[in-house]
Amino acid sequence: MRDLKRASTGVEGLDLLLKGGFPENRVIVVSGAPGAGKTTLGVQFLRAGARNGEAGAYLSILEDPRIVIQDQTVYDPEIPLLYKERKLLFIDAGPLTWGEIIDIGKGDETDESKQPVSPLNLIKRISPLIDEFKIRRLVIDSAMSLRYDYDEGVARKELNRFIRTLKSLNCTTVLLSELTDPTAYAPEHFAAHGVIFMHHFMHDRKMVRAIQIVKMRGTRHDNQLHPLEFSNVGLEVNEGGLILE
Ligand SMILES: Nc1ncnc2c1ncn2[C@@H]1O[C@H](COP(=O)(O)OP(=O)(O)O)[C@@H](O)[C@H]1O
Ligand SMILES: [Mg+2]
C-alpha cells in the first residue's frame, strides 16, 4: 500500500494513531460537543504547519477571531508573532469587520458581503487569500454555522458541494463540526475524507476526554477511544491508553 503524504496534526499522540498525520490535501471533519477541544486542536494543527513553513488560516464564522487568538495564545505565546508574519492567519468570515484582523467580508462592499455566509461564497472569498498567502492548511469553524440558514435538505446538498469544492483547494482542511448527538451522523461526516470525534462524557463517575478516529480514507488507522488531555501547550493524546477497556 503506497503511503499518502502526511501533514502533522501538531499532536504527537494523534499523529501516531494516524500513522503520521492527516493525509495531505484532504478534508477532515473534527466533531465534538462544545468545550470538547475542537478549536484548540484546529489551532494546534495550524501552529505545527506555520512552524514548518506551511502557512495556515483559521476561518471563524461565528466567534470573534480575537477571542480565539487570546485563548490560544495561552498555549503558545508566539501566536501573535506567527499572525504578524502571516504564517498563521485568523480570518473573520462573519458579517462584521475587525480592524487588524483580515476580514474576507471587507473590501467587498457588494450586498453579498452583508448576506449570511453561504458555503460557496466563503470559498469564493477565501480562494484569492490562499494564493496570496500560499496557504496550505485551513481550519473552518464551523460546519453548523454554514447550515443555519438552510432547511435540512438544502443544507445537506450545499454542504456536500462545499466539501467537494474544498477538496479542490490544494489545502489540508479541517472542518470543525458541533456534535450534538454522538450517535447521529451529520452530512459532513459522509462527505469528508476523514472524521475525528472528540468525546467528553461521564465514565465511572468522572468526566473523561477522549479522541477517536472514526474514518480516514487512504490510510490504516486506529479506531478506539484514547485519552485526551489539556496541557500547558495545548492538547495531548495518550495513544497507548484506552478508554472503555
Ligand atoms: N488547561 C485546561 N484544562 C482543562 N480544561 C481546559 C483547559 N483549557 C481549556 N479547557 C476546556 O476546553 C474548553 C475549550 O476548548 P475549545 O478548544 O475551545 O473547545 P471547542 O472548540 O470544542 O468548544 C474550555 O471551555 C474548557 O472547558
Ligand atoms: Mg470552538
Image: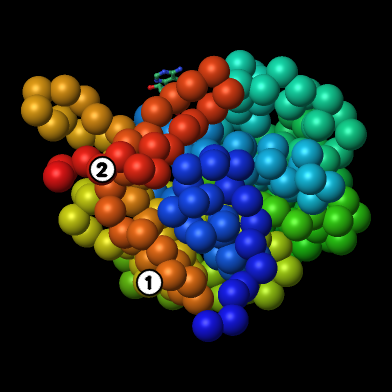
- What residue is rendered at 79% in x and 45% in y? 52
Mark 1 beta carbon near ligand 1 (under 8 Å):
no
* Foreground residue among 176 and 46: 46
On screen, 201 above or below 224? above
Q: Residue 152's mark?
A: none
Q: Position of residue 223 (x, y in %)?
A: 31, 59
User: Is the C terminus in the top left, top right, bottom left or bottom right quadrant?
Assistant: top left
Q: Which residue position is annotated with label 1?
A: 190
* Foreground residue among 227 and 39: 227
Q: Position of residue 97 (x, y in %)?
A: 73, 33
* Mark 2 → mark 1, Cα distance in angstroms: 26 Å
* Amino acid type at mark 1: Phe
Q: Which residue position is annotated with label 2?
A: 242
* Amino acid type at mark 2: Leu
Q: Quadrant of residue 67?
A: top right
Label 1 crowd bin: few (<14), some (14–19), many (20+), radius 10 Å = few
Mark yes or no: residue 67 visible: no
* Foreground residue among 221 and 28: 221
- What residue is rendered at 83% in x and 25% in y? 81
Q: Position of residue 36 (x, y in %)?
A: 37, 34
N-terminal of the pair, mark 2 or mark 1, is 1
- In-image side of 199 versus 69 (left or right): left
Label 2 crowd bin: few (<14), some (14–19), many (20+), radius 10 Å = few
Q: Position of residue 30 (x, y in %)?
A: 44, 51
- In-image side of 93 versus 107 (left or right): left
Indicate the secondary structure of the residue bearing disc 2. loop
Mark yes or no: residue 227 visible: yes
Q: Quadrant of residue 92?
A: top right
